Image: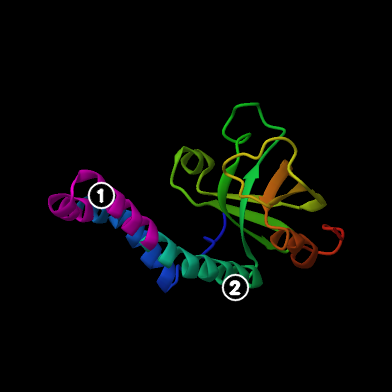
Amino acid sequence: MGEPIIPEPLGKWGKRLVRLQVLTAFIGVVVSGVLREVMGFWFGLGAAVFVVVALQILVWRPAAEEKKLRADRNLAQGILECAIRFPQSTPGSLRDRWANGIGQIIEGRFSFQGLDAGEYNRRMGGQIVVTEITAEGVQTLPGKRPREVLRNWKLLTLGSRQGVVEVAGSPNALQMPKERSSAQKAPDL
């Protein structure tokens, strides 16, 4: 198929957020148990919820800023966070559903690699390569936003040898076909 797409790894705050999310239940149970003995059940429960939420907020803010910087660095390397689907496939099939992942456009070829190791990636062979792409335009998502598509993402329709591919991504990321694909294959958006 193609070489694996390797995005920039999680930074310090991103790793801390993942660890904190794993430890959240444990922290809540310990704090609740300690304070329940001293001040009663409801106060212990309320304090545990407060401590867990406060820790999440304290770590989430720097992690969100770090994620934006990491996405910008990935975009500079030609790697974009996106979701794809093939709208001309059979309704309800795996190719008709949105799949989250990362994509890369190099010389008129769009490569997509799913982020999860679920059923979609096993059936699709891990990486999808779409060749001879032509960008048909950026637009807003019609109808209700699917959960795989993040808020503020736009829709880019790519024509290709394999058929029509819809790519959802941030507006900055969707400008990449104009810059990365060959001039005769991707018109200005």
Identify which residue, 148 or 40, lies in the foreground: 40
The amino acid pointed to by label 2 is: Arg
| Left or right for 5, reference 134 | left
Res 1 visible: yes
SS for callout 1: helix
The amino acid pointed to by label 1 is: Phe
Which residue is denoted by mark 2 in the rendering?
Answer: 73
Occupied quadrant, residue 15 = bottom left
| Left or right for 170, reference 38 | right
Which residue is denoted by mark 1 in the rendering?
Answer: 43
What kind of secondary structure does the magenta stretch mostly adopt? helix
Identify which residue, 180 or 173, lies in the foreground: 173
Magenta stretch bounds: 30-54
Task: Report the residue at 65% width, 27% height from top.
Answer: 90
Q: What percent of the width, then of the height, locates residue 17?
A: 39, 63
Q: Is residue 70 magenta?
A: no
Q: CA distance from mark 2 to mark 1?
A: 45 Å
